[in-house]
Structure formats: structure tokens, C-alpha cells
Image (cartoon, grey):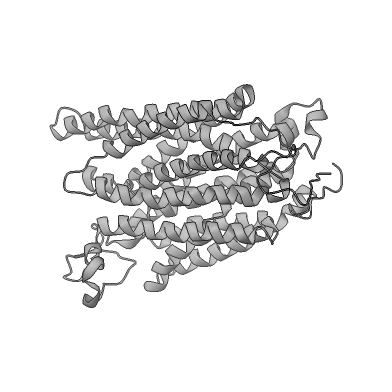
């Protein structure tokens, strides 16, 4: 049975100490990886245009990004268990810094490719290596920071705290596309510059964390896994709420990565086929601030430009952030599994509307999908590691490994788009959200817990 003082504050530990500053410091990491992910999500179209890649080929950016997560998830979990929360965070920051500085030689390879001394594939591979290295560092941060937010106070507020922290992630995701639009789609692109600046910032953060108060708080072991003689992996694999959380997380990140990476393609005219999901823009809109978003297409009509779509990606992430903030409030009064099930069901509907290619309805539905995706990752995470005690660090590594879904499914989504059109590719995330809704609604049966609110473990534990 998990218990806590009902008067205990959201950021007060069992010994009565406030960890609000620690929570704020850890939340800055969420902003960091949101910013890095936001830039990644507007990079695909750049390589499609500059290197002449298909949508499926450009999805290798996501493949390299999430491959880094897959390769480093278990080492990150081991390091966090061996050296504590602080050690895992510092290691992650240093690796992100190394990846950021790698973009300097990667840019040199791009120059060599432009001069014809190396192939464009070699230049592309250079960038992918940097993307993979940064993702490896972010893996350490996510493996540590996600579960750590759940222990910085009473368990009944675990889902609320992780969603509040993920709201900072949403802010980073808003800023990332804005920076990407300026440096990736300008007349003189400078891909390396934002990454080098990020590297400098994370090295400074590493110093701050070195001297900050980051207590090594352990999670409550509601299932008494720590008392068993079985291996950690076996103990986890018989907890169905955790096993299905890994599957749900794999499919969620797959859907998220696909929708995020092809957002620009959804908003612009396909230069090869002429397909467009967004109808021609009325001339009356072509004025003031909005004018910078549009360009005249080959058909003589006004359409959203590539740089304009990259800027609009930030508006989509505003929807994402609003979903996180409102979702965090909902999770204080509603059961997390019910909120997850409802939001996933809503996204099944948005994907159907996009698939049907209904013009402005489909375009708006893409933005709506960002809103309803917002709470999924942190909520699945909190539901998955619930009650696992010290094994939550190992469980966290598996949940972060599930991010590999973002490497595989976008390529399938890109293949469908290449064969048919962009709207039809939304059949891929649609099926992902169906399973997530199933997991949300069935979580009480999988866990033996009625709700994470007023936690009461029942039956066989």
C-alpha cells in the first residue's frame, strides 16, 4: 500500500524538505531536449530540398535520432543506478555537448560535398552522426529526469509533476522550429550554429548540476519487487502495466515522430506531384505579418512556403504546450489512465479526418493532433513505472528504449506518402493511437490499481 500525508505539498519529500528548486532545475532539461527535438522535426524538408531526398530517405534523420535513444537507453539506466540521478544527468549533458560541437566538422563535410570532393551521402551521414550523438546524450537526460520528477514529492502528484515538467519540454519544442526556420531555410543556411550554441549551454548546465542539491530519492516499491530473488528484467516483465506501457510508448513516439517530421510536408505543396493538403491561400491573407508565410506556387496561386511552414510548426507546438498545461490540470482531478484513453481516442479521430483529405478540416486536424498528443509520453511513463520501487531506473531505460519507434515508423509513413500522398500516410499513426487508447482504458486491469490518485494496490501484489 502506498500512502502519503494528504497535507504534503506537491514538491515536499517524505522528510519534509522542499525540492521545488531541484524540480525547476530538472525541468530545464525538459526544455533542452524539447528544443533539440524541435529543430530535428523541421530538418527533414531541408535535406529533401538540398540533397534531393525522398520523404522516406529524409526520415533517416529521425532514424539516427531515435537510434541514439535505443543504443544508449540501457547504459543510461545502468549509470543512473550506479551513480545516482545526478551522475546520469551530468553524463547526458556532456554527451549532448560533444554532439553539438560535432556539427562543425559535419558542416565542413557539407562544404566539401558542395565542392564535389565528397558525395552528398557522406555529408548527410556526417549530420546524422551528430544527430545520433546528441540523441544519445538526451537519452541519459530522459532516462533520469522523467522518473526523477515522479519522486520529487507525494506519489499522488507524480503524473501531475511529470506533465508540468513536460510543459517546459513543450516550450522548447516551440522555440526549436523557430530557430530551425531561421538557420535551415535562410538564403545562407547555417545548421551548425544553433547546435554549437546548445553545446555551450549544456556544458554550463553540467557545472550547475555538479554543485546543485539533487537528492537520490528512491521510489516506493508497491509491488515488493526489491524483496524478490528474481532478476530485475523478469520482475518487470511480469508487471503487465509496465510491459504494455513499453509497447504504448513505442507506438506513441512512432506516431509523434511521423506527424512532427512531416508537418512541413502537410502544410506545403509537394514539388514532385503537386499534391497539397492545404487549399490555396486567399489573397486577402497576404498582408502584414502573415505575408512572410506565403509564396506563389507554380499554379499561380498563393500557398504556404517551406520557411512559413517551419514557422507554423511553432504554432503547432503552442497547441502541444496548451495540451500539456491543460492536461496537467486535468490530471490533478481525473484518473491519468482515463485522460490518456480519451486523448488517444481523440487522436484516432484527427487521423481519420486527415486521412480523408478534407481541405482545411484536415489541416486544422493536424494542429489538433498536437494538442491531444501532448500528455501521452509523460502519462504513459508515469503509468508504466508506477509502484516499481528502485527498479524504476531500469524500467525507465526500457521505456526510453521504446523511443526507437520514432526511428522505424516515420520511414513507413514516408513510404506511404511517397506511394500515395501525405494525407494517406496518417493511417500509420491512426493504428498507433488505437493501441494507446486500449492501454489507457485497460490500465486498471493490467496494474491491479483503480487509479494513481489515492493509490490503492489490490490483488496479488
User: What residue occupies the far right of the structure in this picture?
Assistant: 459
Give the percent coordinates (x, y) of residue 302: 21, 70
- The residue at the point 68 percent across, 33 percent down is 217
Q: Does residue 247 appear to the left or right of 416 in the view shown? A: right
- The residue at the point 47 percent across, 47 percent down is 409
Q: How many marks?
A: 0
Quadrant location of the N terminus?
Answer: top right
Q: Does residue 122 appear to the left or right of 392 in the view shown? A: left
Image quadrant of residue 242?
top right
Relative to 95, does residue 58 appear above or below in the rendering? Answer: below
Give the percent coordinates (x, y) of residue 163: 58, 51
Relative to 433, does residue 25 appear above or below in the rendering? Answer: above
Report whether residue 427 is seen.
no
Relative to 291, does residue 376 appear above or below in the rendering? Answer: above
Give the percent coordinates (x, y) of residue 407: 46, 41
Report whether residue 72 is seen.
yes
Q: Nearer the viewer, residue 54 or 218?
A: 218
Q: Nearer the viewer, residue 415 or 352?
A: 352
Quadrant location of the C terminus?
Answer: top right
User: What residue occupies the far front of the structure in this picture?
Assistant: 17
Q: Nearer the viewer, residue 221 or 4?
A: 4
User: What residue occupies the far top of the structure in this picture?
Assistant: 82
- The residue at the point 65 percent across, 41 percent down is 18
Give the percent coordinates (x, y) of residue 348: 54, 63
Amino acid at each position: 500500500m502506498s500512502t502519503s500525508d494528504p497535507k504534503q505539498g506537491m514538491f515536499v519529500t517524505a522528510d519534509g524538505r522542499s525540492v521545488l528548486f531541484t524540480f525547476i532545475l530538472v525541468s530545464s532539461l525538459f526544455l533542452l531536449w524539447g528544443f533539440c527535438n524541435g529543430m530535428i522535426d523541421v530538418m527533414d524538408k531541408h535535406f529533401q530540398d538540398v540533397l534531393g531526398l525522398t520523404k522516406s530517405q529524409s526520415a533517416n534523420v529521425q532514424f539516427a535520432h531515435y537510434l541514439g535513444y535505443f543504443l544508449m537507453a540501457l547504459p543510461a539506466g545502468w549509470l543512473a543506478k550506479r551513480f545516482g540521478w545526478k551522475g546520469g544527468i551530468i553524463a547526458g549533458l556532456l554527451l549532448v555537448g560533444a554532439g553539438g560541437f560535432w556539427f562543425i566538422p559535419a558542416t565542413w563535410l557539407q562544404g566539401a560535398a558542395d565542392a564535389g570532393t565528397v558525395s552528398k551521402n557522406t555529408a548527410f551521414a556526417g549530420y546524422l552522426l551528430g544527430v545520433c550523438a546528441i540523441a544519445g546524450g538526451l537519452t541519459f537526460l530522459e532516462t533520469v529526469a522523467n522518473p526523477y520528477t515522479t519522486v520529487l514529492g507525494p506519489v499522488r502528484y507524480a503524473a501531475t509533476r511529470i506533465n508540468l515538467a513536460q510543459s517546459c519540454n513543450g516550450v522548447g519544442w516551440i522555440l526549436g522550429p523557430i530557430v530551425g526556420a531561421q538557420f535551415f531555410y535562410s538564403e545562407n543556411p547555417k545548421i551548425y550554429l544553433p547546435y554549437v550554441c546548445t553545446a555551450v549551454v549544456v556544458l554550463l548546465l553540467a557545472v550547475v548540476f555538479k554543485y546543485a542539491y539533487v537528492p537520490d530519492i528512491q521510489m516506493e516499491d508497491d509491488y515488493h519487487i526489491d524483496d524478490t530473488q528474481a532478476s530485475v528484467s523478469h520482475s518487470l516483465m511480469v508487471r503487465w502495466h509496465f510491459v504494455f506501457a513499453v509497447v504504448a510508448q513505442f507506438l506513441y513516439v512512432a506516431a509523434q515522430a511521423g506527424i512532427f517530421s512531416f508537418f512541413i510536408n502537410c502544410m506545403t505543396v509537394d514539388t514532385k506531384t503537386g499534391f497539397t493538403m492545404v487549399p490555396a491561400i486567399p489573397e486577402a491573407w497576404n498582408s502584414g505579418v502573415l505575408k512572410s508565410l506565403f509564396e506563389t506556387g507554380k499554379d499561380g496561386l498563393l500557398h504556404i512556403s517551406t520557411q512559413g511552414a517551419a514557422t507554423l510548426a511553432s504554432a503547432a507546438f503552442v497547441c502541444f504546450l496548451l495540451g500539456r498545461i491543460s492536461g496537467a490540470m486535468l490530471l490533478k482531478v481525473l484518473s491519468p489512465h482515463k485522460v490518456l484513453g480519451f486523448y488517444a481516442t481523440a487522436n484516432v479521430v484527427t487521423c481519420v479526418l486527415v486521412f480523408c483529405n478534407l481541405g482545411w478540416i484536415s489541416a486544422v486536424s493536424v494542429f489538433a493532433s498536437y494538442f491531444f498528443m501532448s500528455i501521452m509520453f509523460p502519462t504513459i511513463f508515469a503509468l508504466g513505472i508506477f509502484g516499481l520501487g528502485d527498479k524504476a531506473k531500469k524500467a525507465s531505460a526500457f521505456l526510453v528504449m521504446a523511443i526507437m519507434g520514432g526511428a522505424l515508423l516515420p520511414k513507413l509513413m514516408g513510404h506511404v506518402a511517397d506511394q500515395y500522398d501525405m494525407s494517406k500516410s496518417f493511417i500509420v499513426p491512426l493504428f498507433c493511437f488505437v493501441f494507446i487508447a486500449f492501454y489507457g482504458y485497460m490500465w486498471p486491469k493490467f496494474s491491479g490499481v483503480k487509479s494513481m490518485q489515492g493509490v490503492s494496490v489490490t490483488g496479488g501484489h
